[in-house]
Structure formats: structure tokens, C-alpha cells
Image: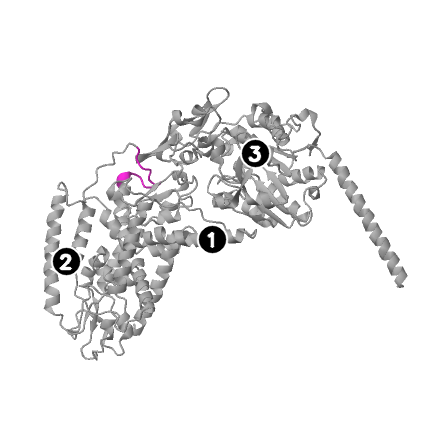
Amino acid sequence: MKRRQFLESSLSAGLLAGVGGTLGGYARLLAAQTAPDLVAVRNGEPEVLFDQGIQAFGGMSRFVQKGQTVVVKPNMAWDVPPERAANTNPRLIRRIVEHCLNAGAKQVYVFDYTCDNWERSYRNSGIEQAVKDAGGKLAPANSERYYQAVKVPKGQRLTEVQEHELILSSDVFINVPILKSHSSATLTVSMKNLMGIIWDRWYWHRNDLHQCIADFATYRKPTLNVVDAYNVLLRNGPRGVSTADVAPMKAQLLSTDMVTADAAAAKLFGIEPDTVDYLRIAHELGAGRKDLEKLTIRKIVL
Amino acid sequence: MPRRYWKPLRVVIATLVFALAALLFLGHAGSLPVASRDALLYPQFIPSLLNYTTLFGLAATGFIAVILLTLLYGRVYCSTLCPLGILQDVFIRLAQWWRPRRVPFHYSRPHSRLAYTVLLLTVLTWLSGSLLLINLLDPFSVFGRLVSDGLRPLYFGAYNLVAYSLAAFGAYPLAPVVWHAAPLPTLLIPLLSLAVLIVLSVRQGRLYCNTLCPVGTLLGLLARVALFRIRIDEEACTVCAQCSIHCKAGCIHLKTRAVDFDRCIACYDCLGVCKGAGIGYRHSHRPSVATVPAAVDSGRRALLRSGLLYLGGLLALTRDVPVGGATTPPPPTIERLPVIPPGAQSLAHFNATCTACHLCVSACPTGVLQPAWLEYGWSGLLQPRLDFAASFCNFECTLCGELCPTGAILPLAKAAKQVTQLGVAHFIKELCIVYTDHTACGACSEHCPTKAVQMVPYRDKLTIPEVREAICIGCGACEYACPVRPARSIVVHGHAEHQAAQPPTTQRLELPVQNNAFPF
């Protein structure tokens, strides 16, 4: 090959790559413009629901860039097996971690500040094994040392809180709650799930729980929320007493807005979003939008 | 067996026993093979004896095996199976390494009066219904507390330091151990034991085992009539004195060539240092040994005889006449009874069987088991209780009952444990946040595994806790979770005797209409 020929071909290859890159950028921009506010998927296995749901957003690469650090926060607060639906479905967590790593994530951390003994909860929720199988890393959250004080500027009752360092240091935060009934908060979904990334949850209980949940939502906004509604604990939540409390729904909700995700989850659960105090307050504080009728919703029934 | 093998064999077994015991009490009981921990616990004399009085089972015959072993070869237990004896050997070894002495030990006169008095008082207080002296003196339990209360915090402190250091670099291969510090005064007794043990062992070898240890003294009595005893062969002995100056028990009297076999802790150091065949095990009826001097023996025999008489006499008295300070404790009169672990059956059974070795305290995965100070009264000093300020009893866990070597906490199957009522939650409405602040809470109900604590309608859409006592098992999850301070608004009152709880009710669930549409 002559030198000129080589230069020419290299140049054109470079040009092509450049243009391609630009086009890619446009494509992403285009996707961003048409991205729905909420994706609701139904009638499939947890993995399939997520594959379809994330596809509707243009794939995981919309949220996770090459070399980024991701933290995935399931609800695995309780020492009960997966069929009790008190913890996020391990199969869903596994799939999400896989998607993140496929998108080029450098590291995917998974943790929860549990209510029951944390080692037993990590293990018996099935999530420990799922994360290991997928290639992610489990992190502990059972010591105050992992938490750092942060300000909640728009908070009314909650103005300062200690937040887990991994949330602060990671590039991407994927919140993966399970939809459940809840004896304190009526319903637990995305916003309530964030009580597992802060240290002093007793403070919240002492200082108007609903207000604190809403206050925190004005400060911490996950990159993406994936609501597991495959099996739903309809009563005796958040821990449940037996599998008799669980109803299969085979659904999943995805949104970048916690308030939107939780409002849709409330409807799916069979109650009006306004009956959940923290949902109403969060909307009023501008933490997100609960007015589903005005939002772009992608519904996928498999 | 050739005499040169005795000591290495003892050292190998003792090392295994010590390592196993240390791991158990450091909190690894849940992860060790069941067979290995059973093997360690089986021959522990006092736990096994107490367990036998509860269970009468084959698994609790360890103390009989030790008695038989002692009747054959003397106090093999004291240097091979007793973790506290081995610990003293470790102290002695360290002291010798730190400041070597050419003559580490020498013959010492027996302190029989002290030893028998301690034994007698221990037996008497036990028979009169208090475990106080047994708990303070049982070598297995003393060792357990040293490791569980003393060493374990340091061990996990170091472990956590490594975990935190690694976490600073974004690596989380180790997770910190959640530490619930035991009440400070409960540390005094282990610390005192440690001080006494170190001072005595470094200066006087195994003096502790021949004075304060009731097991040592009891086995010493049996060793006197052992079939095989360690003796000096006058013909083979060159009077090099090596055996005597290496005897940690100080029981080899070289002038008379006599071995005080009831004080011999069967460490076989003498067999190891003897160049010839001057000292070794001999059949007790073989006459070719030194005559035991009467001076050493008769006094002790007389004391023993009178001691036994004394014991017999007092036994008859103890039924109604209290002896010294160690009397049957009156049932605790405090309003709120302490909560005892699932399987402990009743305060009466638990307080009369637990030696406060703290094996369950070390193993408890949630850390709810904590040593008591005076919650059970003086007699139950250091016996564990459920401390709901520290944590709560995990619904799925039955570890303490599986481990307990004395039978104080009897094993329970998971299904049985889940309907064993340790106590009942009491709700104090006037302290509850829903009542005082008029805001939602429900942390107690959230944590309740049976939903005995349920939220019922209150005012303005609010809900407030209500306890369904029949299905409450007293696990303390509600008390632990209650955010109200200083006094919590839901507290568990222990039962003097555990009750049967009803299993949680399960009604059919009204399934929401399942169609594939979305309600939005």
C-alpha cells in the first residue's frame, strides 16, 4: 500500500467514525426526547419484564456509560425467602447487574441497610447469590462508618441526614424497590426504599415519617427506579407473615421519577396515590410528578 | 505406649482443643462443623454434669467419661481437655519465653484446706439451689467469658479496622461485625479472673487448678485411687531433679521421691524431661515404688474425711437453713421479668442450669443475648438475657439452643421456636409517637414477624399499634424498633415460664382483579 493511499483510507475511516459518533449522539438525543416518563410492563418473568422495560428507554446504555460505577439498591431488609415477596426479586437484581456490566460499568455495587440481621437477610433473600452470579459486588451497610452527613436543602423536617458513601461516590444509582403494603407508610415503593441508604431511620419515625420520606425525595433522585411488582405483598407488609399474603402480579414499572413510579405502583396495588401521604407531599414539594394522566406512559403487555 | 510419646500426644490434643474452644467463643460457633463443636463440648465436666441432670441423655455423659479417665490415668482432663488449663500453660510458656528461668518451678506444699473448702462450698451452694460459685469457678465457663467478653471485642475490633481500611479504597471484601458492648460491670468478673490466672500461673504454675478450681480438686480426689499413677522409680532415678523443677503443679517431692498424684495435672512434662526411665505411669498395685510419706497424706485424708462429714451434715441442713451468703434466691420481685432465650423453659430451670459460659452470647447472630448484671439477682450473675436495646431475637434462628452445653437452653426445632412465647409485648399508648406527635410511625408493627403487633385505625387516617397477645412470641423486634426515648412505648415483659403462642392467623387473600391492563 502506498503511503498516500494509506493516509486517505485512514482519514476517511476517521471521518466516518466521527460522523458516526455525531449521529450516535443525535440518536441518543432523539431517544432522550421521546423517552417515556413511565414504562409499565406486564405478564412476564422478572428478567423478561426488565429486558422489555429497559428497551423502551433505549437500553441500559442510556443510563450507564462505559467505565462508570453503579450502585443498585434493592429492598432486602428481611430474613425471609424470595417467595415471601418481602425483598426484591433476586432474578430481577441479577438481570439489572448483568445489564449494567454489559453497558460497560466498571463496578456494580449492591447493598441495603437491613432491618433483620444483615448477613442472614443478604443470604436468605437470594440476592447475595444473584449478585455474585451476575458479577456484581455486595457491600455492607450495617455500620455508621459507611455513612456521611449531607444536607437536605428543601427538607422541612429532614434538613440533614447521613447517607451511605456508595450513593455519594457512584456515578449511577439504580433504585430497585419491591411494591409492598406497609404498616407505617401505607405503601412502600421507590421513595420508602431510600430509608435503606440512610443511617438514622429512627429519626424519621420520630419526626413525621411521611414528611421525612418526601423531604429526602427532594434531595436524592435515583438515576432510574425499577419497581418489582412480580409478586406483591398485599397485606402484613413490610415483612409479611406467610406466602398467603402474596399475590402474583407479574408487573414491573420503570421511571426516572420516584413520585411517578410510586403513583403508578399505588394504582397497581389498588389504592389512590393521594391516600399515601408522602406521595402527596413529595408532589407538592416538587420532588416529582404524580399526575399520571399528564405523563407519557409506555405500556407493554407481553 | 513409650513414655516419650505421652507429652507430644497431650500437646497435640490440647492445641486442637484450645484452638477449637477459642474459635467457638470468638463467635464462629455457627460456622464450625457440628461434629467438632460437639467433640469439644462433650467432655467439659461441669456443663456435661448439669446437662446430664436435665437430659439424662447419651450426649450428656461426658463427665462420666472424664471420671472414668481419671480413675484410670489421673487428671488427664486438666491439661488436655480443659481450655482454662491449657490457657494457663500458654501463659506459663509466654512467661518462660519472656524471662527464662533455669528453675521454673519447685515442689510446693499442698493447700488442701483451701481447695477442699472451695469444693465444698461450691457443691453446697449448688445443692442449695444457687449456681453462683459454679458460675464463678467452672473452668470452662471462666475460659468462655475470658474469650467471649475479653478477647472477642479486641478480635472484632481488629477485624473491623481492616474492613474499614479496605472500604476506604472502595473495596468491600470484609463486612464489619456489629458490636453490642456488654454492660460494663459484667466485664469486671472476667477481668478479675484473668488477673488471678496470670499472676498465679506465671509465679506458681498451676496453683489455680489445685486451689480454686472445684473440678481440679474433685478429680484430684479420684486421681488418688487411679489405676495407673505417675511415680518415681527409685532404682532408675538419678535424682537429676529435672522432673521436679519442671512440674507446673509443684507436686514432685524429690527428697522422698513422692509424686502427689492428686495434684498432678497430667501434663507429662516430667516424662519429657526425664533422661532415663526414672518417672512414668505405673500400675497402682505394683509395689516397686517409693513409699508415700505419711506426713503428706494423713493430714489431708483427715481433712477430707471431716470435710465429707461436714458436707453430709450440711446437706441435711440446707433444705431449710440458709448457709452463708449463698442461699436460694427469692424469685425476682421486679415488675418486668428478664426475658430468657427460647428453649430455656423457665427462670427456675434456666437459673439453675446456666453456668454463664457465654457461648450463646458469642454465637448469637443478632447480639440480643447479653450477660446480665443483677437482672436475675446475685445468683444469676452473668447469665445471659435478651437485651432488646441491643437487638432482637431472629425469628428463623435456633442457634443458642443447639449450642448450649449445660442444657440451660434446650434445643428447639424452628417450628417449635416460632410458637414459643418468651414473654409478651406491652404497648404504652401515652408514650407512642402516634399519640404524642400525631404523626405516623408503626416501626414496631413493621418488625413484628407474626404481626402480633398490628396497626389499627386511630384518628385522622392515622393508625396506632395494638398487641394480639395470643400470637406474640416476645422476640423483642417491636421493642428494639420503637424510636421513642428514653423509655420505649412498647416493651416485652418476660414470662417466668415460657408459654405456647398460637401460630399467626392466615386468612385467604382477596386477590385483586387480574387482567393485563394497567389501572392508569
Numbered disc 1: secondary structure: helix
**Residue at 43% over, 52% down:** B157
Secondary structure predominantly adopted by residues drawn in magenta: loop
Label 1: which residue? B161
Pointer 2 residue: B113
User: Where's residue B47, x and y in %?
Assistant: 28, 51
Q: Are marks 3 and 2 on the same chain?
A: no
For this rendering, which residue is in front, A97 or A139? A139
- Residue B316 % position (x, y): 12, 45
Magenta residues span: B336-348
Evaluate whether residue B265 shows in this view.
no
Horizontally, residue B78 falls left or right of residue B120, namely right
Q: Quadrant of the N terminus of chain B?
A: bottom left
Its colouring scheme is one colour
**Picture layout, residue B509 above or below residue B21:** above
Q: Which residue type carries mark 1?
A: Leu
Q: Closest to the observer: A48 or B272?
A: B272
Please name which of the two marks, 1 or 2, marks the residue nearer to the observer: 1
Measuring from the top left, give residue B517's x and y in whole percent.
67, 27
Name which of mark 1 and mark 2 comes first in the sequence: 2
Which chain does the residue under circle 3 lie in?
A
